[in-house]
Amino acid sequence: MGNWITIERIISDYFSGGKYQLSKFNFAMLLNENLKTYLENCLSQQISVPVNIREILAIGGGSINYAYCLNTNAGKFFAKINNASKFPEMFTAEARGLELLAETNTFNIPNVIKVGDFENVSFILMEFIEAGKCVKNFFADFGSKLATLHQHTNIYFGLNHDNYIGSLKQSNIQQKNGVMFFIHERLQVQIALAEQNRMIDSSTIEQFEKLYGKLETILPKEKSSLLHGDLWSGNFMTSPGGKACLVDPAVYYGNREADIAMSKLFGGFDNDFYESYNATFPLIKGWEQRIDVWNLYPLLVHVNLFGGGYVAQVKSILKRFC
Ligand code: ADP
């Protein structure tokens, strides 16, 4: 496959203050000389300037793809690559998700330059977001913008195409009933996968069956909202203007509490975020008590992606609601 490019630098701790922590680390990856030349040609065509990639920096922080900053004579670009046959259409779906978010004119969203395949490597090329310094009201602005994004509603839950959550396929078959959507398209899909991979036992599956019967009373009834779909702290950045920029979405129309819940899965965002969200588009009373129910979905995704350590969390939530 040609000469491997050695990448000696990882950019990590990217979000917090935009500091690049450099460490020596050698990669043998999918980004070889041939792909580099191909990406140069793509960039040259797209921006109508001959582009030479001078340096490739690996970026940490993501969990699924190989991410890079491409330093070129025409500025920086962001690239993600992965195995094309393992994850078909993954970057096409990501580009469509970013476009849907961008159309709402709420957040800064990186502009996608090109999605393509080269020798069984798929890639997405996009605008490089140079991490800025957070403005003082960063989280208040973030919260009110998310509330505005969530005011883009639909009569259906789901989406007109499937996409990915992490590296797992996310089915988005549209339906009018939000609870049924959550059960069929979110929980059951992941439970089937977890069962197939022997990650969960039959008593957990039985408890889920019990929970399904209660969800109509537990969950609120609202129109579906356009969601980011994977809103944890690794999926927003600080744009050069100091405000939130969303990346790596798994969009669909769903209950907006799912995005709020996801934001709380690993510790939660600053309190200003929730206050400002609620001031703009108040959540239905009792939303705090429903967070763990919504988070059964990302937790099951974590079970399937990263292993059984998350099963205990799933079980303890089921115990409380069944
Ligand atoms: P993955 O698909 O593997 O989860 P992400 O899309 O989350 O990868 O990207 C990995 C990291 O790269 C993010 O955490 C973020 O810090 C950074 N990043 C994402 N998009 C851009 C961009 N357009 N410009 C600069 N950095 C980015």
Image (cartoon, grey):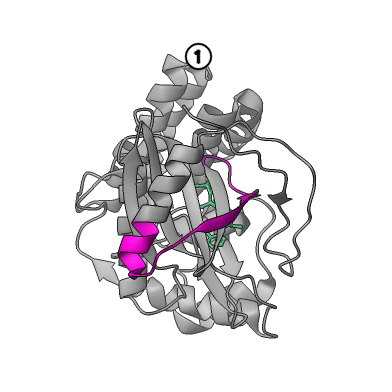
State yes or no: residue 322 in magenta. Answer: no
Kind of residue sitting beneath label 1: Arg
Say if residue 315 shows up in the picture. Answer: yes
Q: Quadrant of ligand 1?
A: bottom right
- Residue at position x 50%, y 39% from top? 33
**Count of residue discs:** 1
- Residue at position x 50%, y 62% from top? 77
Q: Is residue 190 above or below residue 60?
A: above
- Residue at position x 34%, y 28% from top? 85
For residue 319, side relative to residue 46 (left or right)? right
For residue 264, side relative to residue 98 (left or right)? right
Percent x, y of residue 128: 52, 65
Q: Is residue 10 above or below residue 73?
A: above
Based on the displayed image, in which of its 4 quarters is residue 221 positioned? bottom left
Residue stretch in magenta: 42-65
Q: Nearer the viewer, residue 22 or 175?
A: 22
User: Which residue is label 1 attached to?
Assistant: 198
For residue 205, side relative to residue 222 (left or right)? right
